[in-house]
């Protein structure tokens, strides 16, 4: 099962709102430098700036929350419900921390190709989740959660954290990664229990 990744809870093409902290300036300079070097628009996760990375994470969190809300609606399995509640609680909490930090830094997240890809990839998964029920739903949901957390955790650990410039943003991602690795393990247990 190798389809994961996501839709659109936010359409924020919000750009940097302030430069007092120097944060926005750094992101702008990066974009400017690329333009000057006549480089193409970033198409690799490693090329994203901190504010774009934050947008990807925010988008990924919201996609998992969407999947969880469908699970609460369509599944009657108590394990699935408990997992989905955990996803909603944790991803919401991390997003709130991220927004508070960006607010403190005087910056806003920036939409980008990867967020758009995540949202696009989530659409068929949402359609499929909406079409299934019973054990079939539970197996698909658990398998997708496992694949999704594996993919996003890998992205965060290997592409994002090494490239984040701001120390506070980096720390937040490290905390988030710890939580989301826990989700991955939890998803693995669910998959095992469902006999898939
Ligand atoms: Fe999660």
Image (cartoon, rainbow, N blue to C red):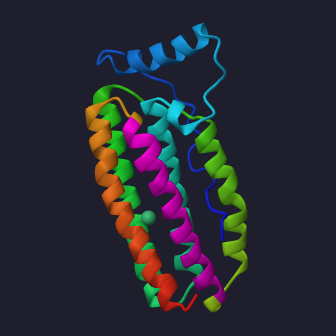
155 within the magenta span:
yes
Along the line of sight, the residue nearer the viewer: 96 or 116 = 116
How far across and how far down the image is residue 58, in percent?
47, 47
The magenta region covers: 136-162
Q: Quadrant of ligand 1?
A: bottom left
Magenta region, main secondary structure: helix
Along the line of sight, the residue nearer the viewer: 4 or 99 = 4
Q: Is residue 172 above or below residue 91?
A: above
Q: Is residue 153 above or below residue 18?
A: below
Along the line of sight, the residue nearer the viewer: 163 or 85 = 163
Left or right side of 31 for 132: right
Any part of residue 61 in sight: no
Q: Single out the residue that lies furthest toward the top.
A: 36
How far across and how far down the image is residue 91, in percent?
40, 59
Quarter of the image containing the C terminus?
bottom right
How far across and how far down the image is residue 166, in percent?
31, 30
Residue at 60 percent of width and 84 percent of height: 139
125 within the magenta span:
no
Residue at 41 percent of width and 49 percent of height: 157
How far across and how far down the image is residue 131, in percent?
73, 77
Any part of residue 103 in sight: yes
Left or right side of 174 for 145: right
Quarter of the image containing the N terminus?
bottom right
Residue at 58 percent of width and 71 percent of height: 144
Left or right side of 53 for 6: right
Question: How many numbered marks, from 0 up?
Answer: 0
Q: Is residue 76 above or below residue 88?
A: below
């Amino acid at each position: 099962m190798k389809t994961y990744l996501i839709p659109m809870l936010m359409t924020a093409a919000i750009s940097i709102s302030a430069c007092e902290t120097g944060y926005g300036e750094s992101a702008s300079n990066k974009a400017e430098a690329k333009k000057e070097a006549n480089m193409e628009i970033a198409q690799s996760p490693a090329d994203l700036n901190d504010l774009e990375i934050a947008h990807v994470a925010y988008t990924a969190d919201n996609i998992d929350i969407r999947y969880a809300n469908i699970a609460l609606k369509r599944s009657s399995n108590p394990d699935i419900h408990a997992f989905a509640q955990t996803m909603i609680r944790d991803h919401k909490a991390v997003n709130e921390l991220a927004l508070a930090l960006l607010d403190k830094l005087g910056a806003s997240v920036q939409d980008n190709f990867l967020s758009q890809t995540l949202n696009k990839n989530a659409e068929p998964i949402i359609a499929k989740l909406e079409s299934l029920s019973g054990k079939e739903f539970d197996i698909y949901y658990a398998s997708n959660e496992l694949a999704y957390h594996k993919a996003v955790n890998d992205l965060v650990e290997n592409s994002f954290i090494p490239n984040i410039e701001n120390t506070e943003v980096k720390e937040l991602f490290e905390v988030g990664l710890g939580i989301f690795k826990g989700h991955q393990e939890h998803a693995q247990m669910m998959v095992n229990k469902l006999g898939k």
